[in-house]
């Protein structure tokens, strides 16, 4: 049995056995957030050697190679619309990674994460479809103001701009991941989107970074690619198949707080009292926006059944993870 067969069949079957309820999807989402923030904290140390764009380049290229080798997607099995969605997801993934790495090179991890979180907050508010839900962006904005302290005049506006760009990419990432996860069985969608992200990262940062690389940096990039984005992106795709977009948005509300905690413990980035309160406001806004859409009942995503080529018998497709 090939690596592709083992990945395509064994992994989804394992997840199907473990994830009978949405609680398992919740656990996957929380674990993904922890991996993301630990990976970002580890990335900060490499910025001095290859720059923010260099760290993003290493993560994206190795992640794309790993996913392509492990899964080996057969492009002929994809419908054209699904393949284009995977390519779009790859482009958005590259933008998210490049922009956020540039942001954390200029801002504390917790602050950058709070700004980036405005993206999924916007998705939750949009899904809520209620005027009352507009209070949550206002609350989050107040929290962001407390965290960035614009009255001090020391906020890096370029870093803020990068973080807001990452927020837009994260919103698009959530919507595209839901689309790809619903249409493509197994991890085939991720196996297409991550190589695309690696290509985009190479085009943007490769020429400046390649002359700086050593084998030590390559090994570090490989380790980071496993911790972030391969593991969390796979976990998020699994989670989005088990919980509604609103629930996913609620869980993502915890990410800025996790980022601030890891920034404090790992990077010794100590927030001031007002900034910590601002973080509470951002998290509360995210939870409130997602709960506003809780009326939308969760229904499992129908599995994608590929149509076999003419003349070949159809095969059973494992349930989506």
Image: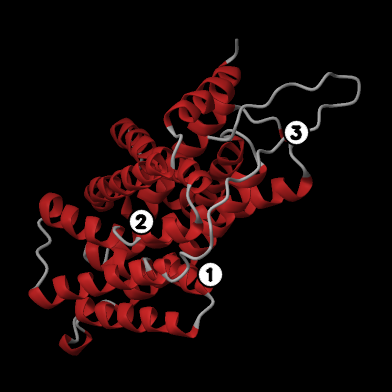
Q: In which quarter of the image is the N terminus?
A: top right
Instruction: Using a 10 Å C-alpha cutoff, classify the residue at mark 2 as few (fewer than 14 neighbours), some (14 to 19) or many (20 or more).
Output: some
Q: Which label lies toward us, 1 or 3? A: 1
In the rendered structure, are the residues bearing label 2 and label 1 in contact, judged by CB atoms less than 8 Å apart?
no
Instruction: Using a 10 Å C-alpha cutoff, classify the residue at mark 1 as few (fewer than 14 neighbours), some (14 to 19) or many (20 or more).
Output: some
Q: Percent x, y for residue 126?
A: 52, 73
Between 294 and 195, which is closer to the camera in this rendering? Answer: 294
- Which disc is residue 251 wearing? 2
Which color scheme is applied? secondary structure
Identify residue for label 1: 127
Q: Is 143 placed above or below 100 here? A: below
Q: Percent x, y for residue 170?
A: 46, 61
User: On the picture, is 167 further left or further right than 189?
Assistant: left
In the rendered structure, are the residues bearing label 1 and label 3 in contact, judged by CB atoms less than 8 Å apart?
no
Identify residue for label 3: 306
Which circle's residue, 1 or 3, is located before the other in the chain?
A: 1
Residue at the location (83% across, 18% down)? 313
Q: Cα distance, mark 2 to mark 3? A: 31 Å
Q: Which label lies toward us, 2 or 3? A: 2
Q: Percent x, y for residue 54?
A: 38, 50
Which residue sits furthest top?
1
Which circle's residue, 2 or 3, is located before the other in the chain?
A: 2
User: On the picture, is 1 further left or further right than 276?
Assistant: right
């Amino acid at each position: 049995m090939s690596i592709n067969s083992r990945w395509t069949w064994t992994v989804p079957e394992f997840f199907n056995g473990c994830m009978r309820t949405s609680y398992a999807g919740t656990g996957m989402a929380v674990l993904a957030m922890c991996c993301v923030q630990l990976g970002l904290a580890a990335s900060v140390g490499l910025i001095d050697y290859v720059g923010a764009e260099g760290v993003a380049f290493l993560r994206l290229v190795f992640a794309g190679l790993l996913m392509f080798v492990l899964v080996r997607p057969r492009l002929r099995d994809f419908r054209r619309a699904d393949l284009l969605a995977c390519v779009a997801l790859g482009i958005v993934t590259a933008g998210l990674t490049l922009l956020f790495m540039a942001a954390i090179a200029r801002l504390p991890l917790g602050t950058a994460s709070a700004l980036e979180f405005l993206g999924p907050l916007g998705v939750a508010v949009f899904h809520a479809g209620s005027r009352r839900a507009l209070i949550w962006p206002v609350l989050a904005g107040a929290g962001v103001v407390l965290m960035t302290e614009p009255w001090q005049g020391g906020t890096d506006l370029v870093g803020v701009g990068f973080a807001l760009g990452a927020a837009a990419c994260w919103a698009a990432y959530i919507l595209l991941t839901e689309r790809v996860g619903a249409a493509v069985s197994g991890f085939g969608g991720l196996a297409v989107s991550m190589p695309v992200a690696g290509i985009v990262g190479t085009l943007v940062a490769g020429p400046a970074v390649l002359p700086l690389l050593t084998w030590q940096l390559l090994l570090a990039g490989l380790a980071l690619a496993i911790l972030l984005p391969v593991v969390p992106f796979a976990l998020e795709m699994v989670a989005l198949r088990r919980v509604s977009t609103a629930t996913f948005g609620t869980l993502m509300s915890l990410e800025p707080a996790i980022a601030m905690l890891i920034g404090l413990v790992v990077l010794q980035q100590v927030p001031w009292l007002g900034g910590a309160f601002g973080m509470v406001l951002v998290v509360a806004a995210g939870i409130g926006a997602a709960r506003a859409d809780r009326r939308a009942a969760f229904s499992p995503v129908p599995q994608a059944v590929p149509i076999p080529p003419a003349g070949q018998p159809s095969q059973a497709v494992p349930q989506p993870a």
